[in-house]
Amino acid sequence: MAFFLWFLAFVAVFAVGSVLAIYSYGRFARKARGAASYCLPKAEDQTPLDRIVAPLEAAHPGQTGLALGFDNRESFLLRLQSARLARRSLDLVYYIWRDDMTGRLLARELMAAADRGVRVRLLLDDVNAQGLDPKFRALNGHPGIEVRLFNPIRNRGNALRRGLEILLSWVRFNRRMHAKFWIADGRLAITGGRNIGNDYFDAPTDFGRRPNRDADILMLGPLVDEAGTLFDSYWNSSEALPIAAFWRDYEAGLERFRRRLAVNAQRPATRRYLESLKRLDDTLVDGCLPGNLQWDKGARLVADPPEKALGLGQQHWSPGQLVPVMQSAQERLRVMTPYFVPGRAGMAQLVGLARKGVRIEVLTNALSATNHVVVHGAYRSYRHGLLSAGVRLREFAAHDSGEMLHSKGFSVDGRQAFVGSFNFDLRSAFLNIEAGVLFEAPALVAEFDAEFDRCAAPDQAYSLALGHKARVTWTLCRGNEGRQTILLAHEPEAPALRRGASWLIGMLPIHSYL
């Protein structure tokens, strides 16, 4: 009885603390909000990007120019070149912006653009910006750059107070900005799965991070206008607060940061990386557009509204647009995602399609390759049911390259495909703000399917099946060893501790948070 009373008292105190924390933050946020701002109007012949893109749009009225980006270095070069050509505006939103070689190179380009008079707006999700405040405060110290944080924690300096705030405000803190946009002069936009950092751009990685195999999609035309309007809605939302609001007085350190960026640009590793990009120059059209550009009348921007961060407007969330497309499959559905937690409803939908004769292929990371053991633990509990229904599962484990799959997308019947930031898990469905593009251009759909085939090839991914006594088996092909069938009760090439953690997590009722 005494323990029960103590437990009730703890719950009551925690509940009161949570209410007070949320109330206090709400008062602070209302006062801290920055002035509203919006995308700058385009012109026909004002900037280099106007002169490059406007004639292309005029030649393809009502259509969207699209290009898929699977090459990491080309994806970096597109951002670098579009920043250098920008003369009007750069509007950027990212989940992660690392303070590493490529992160600093692009930060330097933002500063150089602002020096030319370009207006730069940078919106960062706060969960990965914490600990990098001096860098982003320095950028914000430039009169042409404004940095805002999405759904930020108020306590920045003290780790104990910050941890307590996160604990008391967990419901709010758990909703993140996971969408990514790079919009230059309102003419060119890039969205997809890539964050900003060495592991996304095929640069040397630190701290044991794996290089990512990822996917972007570049846009010209009407969808860029939609992306700009969407960016404005994020930027002006109640959840986006100016980074300057968290310090009454601070020294931005702009010039010190500028010198640090210059030093980074002169380091031998940086110069070698930039030199390696020169081989890609000939592949770009007008110095900033990929050669595989296609024009599509049926392309759609699919994105969550900012109110998803408050748990509101569910009828406008991404699953409401993506699930019907996936359910329309008649012959084949191919899903590529680093994290796969379909939930009960998603599981039932996939099983239902499979039983109708639709060939369903799912490619995700193996336990030996994933960077989120927790999420993999949830995924493993769905494997048996999916395999029993005839769903084909592949687990990416490219040991030769050391890569981790980070591409997110699907294709339906070879006629339509999607690429974006949306992981096929419950977090992307119900918690995070996501964005991507649905498209129908046959050449681009074929390009997506070709990338799926490359990543799911026998030398790149395990093929799963149910073997003796319905135990999961893994089949793979490695080099000259020939085709090997591995019959194991545990994940191949993963340490015992990792396997144990994965099994334990899979037993916990936390899938809706993953």
Image (cartoon, grey):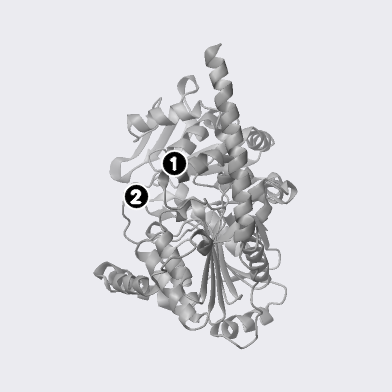
Task: Identify which residue, 104 or 249, lies in the foreground.
Answer: 249
| Residue linked to disc 1 | 372
Q: Position of residue 51 (x, y in %)?
A: 58, 86
Nearer-the-camera pick, 359 or 42: 42
Q: Are marks 1 and 2 in contact (CB under 8 Å)?
A: no
Q: Amino acid at mark 1?
A: His
Q: Secondary structure at mark 1?
A: loop
Residue furthest left in the image: 268
Residue 176 is tagged as none
Whole-Å distance between the Cαs marked 1 and 2?
16 Å
Q: Position of residue 507 (x, y in %)?
A: 50, 25
Residue at the far right in the pictured view: 315
Instruction: Name the residue beneath numbered marker 2.
Output: 402
Query: Which image quadrant is residue 485 in?
Result: top left
Residue 441's spot in the image, x, y percent?
64, 64
* Residue 262 horizontal/vertical position (percent): 32, 74
Rendered view: 503 above or below 424: above
Element class at badge 2? loop
Mark 1 vs mark 2, foreground winner is 1
**Mark 1: few, some, or many residues within 10 Å (few <14, many ≥20)?**
some
* The N terminus lies in quadrant: top right
Dot 1 or dot 2: first in sequence order is 1
